[in-house]
Amino acid sequence: MLDRICAGAVDRILTYLIIHVIFYTGIKYMSNYDQYRVAKIKDVSRICEIHNRCVLLVNSKFYSKKGIGEWLKQISNENIKHQFLNSSWFVLSLDNKVIGFAQIGFDNKTIFQINIDPDFQNKGYGKKLYEFVESLF
């Protein structure tokens, strides 16, 4: 049992170190023209825009107007900045434009959300971002 606890602690420490190396050195994961990196405060407004567009243009097909309205009230730059303190965020860029983002929790290996701008959906970017995030766990 101690071996499993130690292995789990080592995994968490290594993940923590990898994320901090990425963040502090600015290392970016790249594949052809798409790029994955730790989200920064300068990305908050674009993240908010993408999230709003996804709710309005995609999720609204599956939820009530009341539910969508309540959901949209929760999406704000301030709320996202606050969530930066409690979770890890990554963005996917294409030709230097953020086209998607992921919010994850390393403590319990949770993907809270992945959103791709509706203009770039159905092109495999969501799957790529998911696979990138999954590789971090």
Image (cartoon, rainbow, N blue to C red):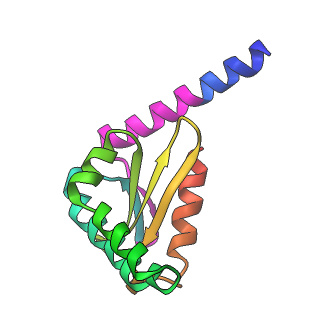
Is residue 40 found left or right of 116 in the rendered image?
Answer: left
Q: Nearer the viewer, residue 52 or 111?
A: 52
Residue 109 location, quadrant: top right
In the image, what residue occupies the spot 27% across and 45% down?
Answer: 82
Q: Quadrant location of the N terminus?
A: top right
Tell me residue 70's x, y (percent): 35, 68
Residue 29 location, quadrant: bottom left
Q: Nearer the viewer, residue 52 or 14?
A: 52
Residue projecting furthest to the top = 2
Tell me residue 105's x, y (percent): 50, 43
Residue 123 on the magenta span: no
Tell me residue 92's x, y (percent): 40, 65
Q: Nearer the viewer, residue 28 or 74?
A: 74
In the image, what residue occupies the spot 60% across and 51% down?
Answer: 135
Up-down relation of residue 64 to residue 37 (above or below): below
Tell me residue 81's x, y (percent): 25, 49
Is residue 108 found left or right of 3 in the rendered image?
Answer: left
> Which region of the structure is painted magenta?
12-33
Q: In this rendering, does residue 19 appear at all?
A: yes
